[in-house]
Image: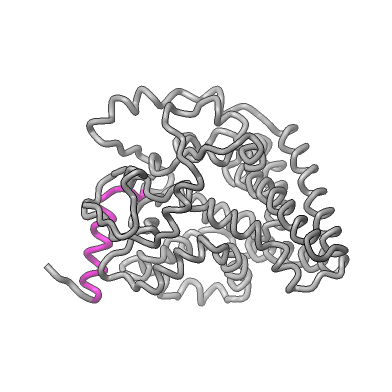
Amino acid sequence: MTVTGRHSSELLWRELQRSGNASAAGGGRERVRPEEAGDRRETLMDISDIKNRDHTRGNLSITALVLVLNIGTLYFYSLADGWWAIALSFVAMCTLMTTFSLLHEAVHRSFSRHAYINEAAGVVLGAFFPTSFHLQRRFHLNHHRNNRSLFEQFEYHRPKDARWIKSAQWYSILTGIYWFTAVAGVFFYLLIPTRFKKASRWRNKSTHFAVQTSSANYLNAALEESQTLIKAELLFALLFQVALCASFGISFGDWILYHVPFAIFWSNLQYVDHAYSEFDSKWGAWNLGMNRFFSGVLLNYNYHLTHHLYPDVGWADLPEITVDTEEQSYFRILTRMWGGTRPAPLEAGPRREPLSEISKGERHH
C-alpha cells in the first residue's frame, strides 16, 4: 500500500508509538527479544552500591588538568604555524574529548554526588565545548529516551524521506560538520524569542520532517528547561570563548581550524557507537574496542553499551560492570558508515545487524 503526505506521516508516527522504542519520560522500560530475555536479565546486575560511589575528587583533579591544558594548548596554537599548529590542534582534540566526557558525567549527575559541585562543573565544562550545560542535559537525556527509535536511525532511509536531508545529516556526522552546526545551532537558539520557539511547526511530531530529523523531540526537550537559564549559560560560554580568542589574538578562522580534529572525532563518535545496532533504547549501542590511551582520553566513553544499560554509573566504574559482549571496532564501523545510508529494515522491532553482513548497496530484510 502506498501512502502520501500527512497520512504517511501519521502512519509513521503510529509505527513509532507501537514500537515502544521511545521510552516515556522518566521511564526507560527495557525491551528485549523473547529468545534473549532470560540471558539479558541474568546479565543485568544490581548496581545500587556502585552507582552511589562518589568520584568528586578524581573528577575535579582531571577537570583542573584538562582545563589548564585546553587554555595552554590554545595559547601555544596562537603562537605556532604550519605543522606545529596542526600538531597542537590534535592535542586539543584529545583534551577537548576528555572535557566533553566530563561534561557527559555532569549531565548524568555522575561527576559529583554533591549537586552544587556537579552543576557548577557542568556549566564551566559546557563553556569549553561550547554550549549550555542544562540545554545539553535536556538534549542528551532525550537521546537516551529515543535511542534507536524512528527518531534516531540516521543510517537508514525510508521511501518518504527527503534523501538530501538524510545525506546531509549523515555526512555531517562523518566530516565533523555536525559539531560546527551543533555549536552554531545553540547560539542561534540564543537569538530566537521563546514565543517563536513554542509556536514553531518543528515541534509537531506528526510531521515526517520531525521524525526524520528528530527536530520535534529536541526542540520540545529544550523548552522543558528554563529559557532564562539556557540563555545565561550560552551567553557565558560565548563571552568566555570570545575572551580567550581576544586574549591570545586568535581570529575566528583560526578558532575554526583549531577545532577541526576535535569536531571530526567528536562527530564520528556520536554515532559510531550506535550505528547498525538493534532498535532498542538500552541495547542499541556498542562497546567499542580502543587502546588504553584513547579509552583514557574518552574516560571510558567507548563503553557505550554499558553506559546505556547503566546510565547512572560513573565512567570509572564502567569496565567493572561491562556485560559479556563482544567489543566492536571503531574503525570498522566508521568505514561502513562511509558507504552511505541504507534502506531501512522492514521490521519495526528490535534487531541487531551483524557488522560482518554490512556491505555497500546490500538491502536487509
Of 271 and 191, the residue lying toward us: 271
Q: Is 266 positioned to the left or the right of 6 in the image? A: right
Q: Quadrant of residue 153?
A: bottom left
Figure check: 78 above or below 292: below
Q: Is 2 positioned to the left or the right of 122 in the image? A: left
Give me the residue at 82% from left, 61% from top.
77
Give me the residue at 84% from left, 53% from top.
72
In the rendered image, the quadrant that contains the N terminus is: bottom left
**Percent x, y for residue 322?**
49, 29
Of 358 and 63, the residue lying toward us: 358
Q: Quadrant of residue 211?
A: bottom left
Q: Main structural element of the magenta stretch: helix, strand or loop?
A: helix
**Percent x, y for residue 306?**
48, 35
Give me the residue at 51% from left, 66% from top.
172
- Residue lying farthest front? 83
Of 86 and 215, the residue lying toward us: 86
**Percent x, y for residue 320?**
55, 25
Q: Is 298 positioned to the left or the right of 79 in the image? A: left
**Percent x, y for residue 260?**
66, 63
Examine the rendering and report whether any part of residue 142 can be seen. Answer: no
Magenta segment: 5-22
- Residue lying farthest left? 1
Examine the rendering and report whether any part of residue 310 can be seen. Answer: yes
Of 33 and 81, the residue lying toward us: 81
Figure check: 184 above or below 286: below
Give me the residue at 45% from left, 70% from top.
168
Q: Is residue 30 magenta?
A: no
Figure check: 41 above or below 100: above
